[in-house]
């Protein structure tokens, strides 16, 4: 997220309150992501689960240790499984400032290199492999962080933890590697006890078609973490419409 300005007028215009970030420390969360994607008249399902542990750094910031536990694809022998194997192993260490904003990923270059090796294994078609390599090699540091730490970034919401209720225009920046599009639309914020519920509808018009998004996210006010997010996306191009539905949940994990 982009840091908010401190001037009161800017805060009121953006409909925000004070940033708040206080995850429980040294105790695991379970981060689950389920995506259902329309493909050729059938639904393909991707599921991944990660363990996330927040610890405090000496400088007052945080580090998040993210370990991929499981990853599955309803399509057998898929490229998704090969890329998941490339990202498995040692925990991903994401450095955050004291407000919960991401600063860096430790050993990002080495992790990005493992992802390139995963592309080599996953993409058996030479033309596809070369295209993916070009996207991989041309990615900026910010794009690399988004790809590698994306599941964690999705649940960091310190700026949303004390939002003011209401509706306002919103612009969602392009994310990831490749022909991503910034989206514009409307965002509604509601307070529900100890939670903030943010509902967003947005669209983008690009060379590949029209992309539509409806997103609902529930933010725990105490911790500044998203406990649930649901995305419903559709891409309309050349008279066809394909969609995907994603649900992300973050829950305290039982300690063995």
Image (cartoon, grey):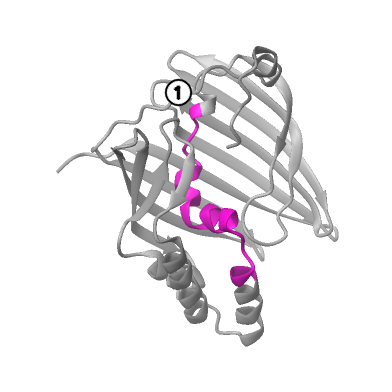
Please identify the quadrant where the C terminus is shown: top left
Q: Which residue is mark 1?
A: 20
Residue 118 percent across, percent down from the top left: 46, 74
Q: Which residues are magenta?
A: 135-158
Left or right of residue 62, residue 129 in this image: right
Magenta stretch secondary structure, dominant? helix
Residue visible at 47% across and 64% down in the picture: 74
Furthest toward the left, the residue is 256
In front of the other: 183 or 97: 97
In front of the other: 226 or 159: 159
Q: Is residue 62 above or below residue 205?
A: above
Q: Is residue 119 above or below residue 160?
A: below
Left or right of residue 49, residue 34 in this image: right
SS assignment at label 1? loop
Q: Is residue 199 above or below residue 249?
A: above
Residue 77, quarter of the rendered image: bottom left
């Amino acid at each position: 997220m982009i840091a908010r300005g401190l001037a009161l007028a800017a805060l009121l215009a953006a409909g925000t309150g004070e940033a708040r970030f206080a995850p429980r420390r040294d105790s695991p969360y379970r981060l689950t992501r389920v995506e259902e994607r329309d493909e050729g008249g059938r639904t393909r399902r991707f599921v991944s689960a990660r363990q996330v542990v927040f610890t405090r750094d000496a400088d007052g910031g945080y580090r998040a240790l993210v370990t991929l536990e499981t990853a599955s694809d309803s399509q057998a022998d898929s490229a998704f499984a090969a890329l998941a194997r490339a990202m498995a192993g040692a925990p991903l260490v994401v450095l955050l400032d004291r407000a919960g904003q991401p600063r860096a990923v430790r050993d990002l270059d080495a992790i990005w290199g493992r992802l390139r090796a995963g592309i080599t294994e996953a993409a058996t078609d030479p033309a596809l492999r070369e295209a993916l390599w070009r996207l991989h090699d041309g990615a900026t540091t910010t794009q690399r962080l988004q790809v590698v730490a994306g599941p964690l970034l999705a649940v960091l919401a310190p700026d949303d933890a004390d939002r003011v209720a209401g509706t306002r225009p919103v612009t969602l920046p392009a994310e990831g590697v490749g022909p991503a599009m910034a989206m514009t639309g409307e965002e509604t914020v509601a307070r529900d006890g100890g939670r903030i519920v943010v509902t967003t509808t947005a669209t983008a018009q690009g060379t590949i078609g029209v992309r539509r998004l409806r997103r609902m996210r529930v933010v725990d006010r105490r911790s500044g973490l998203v406990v649930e997010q649901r995305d419903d996306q559709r891409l309309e191009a050349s008279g066809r419409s394909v969609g995907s539905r994603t649900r992300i949940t973050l829950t305290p994990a039982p300690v063995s």
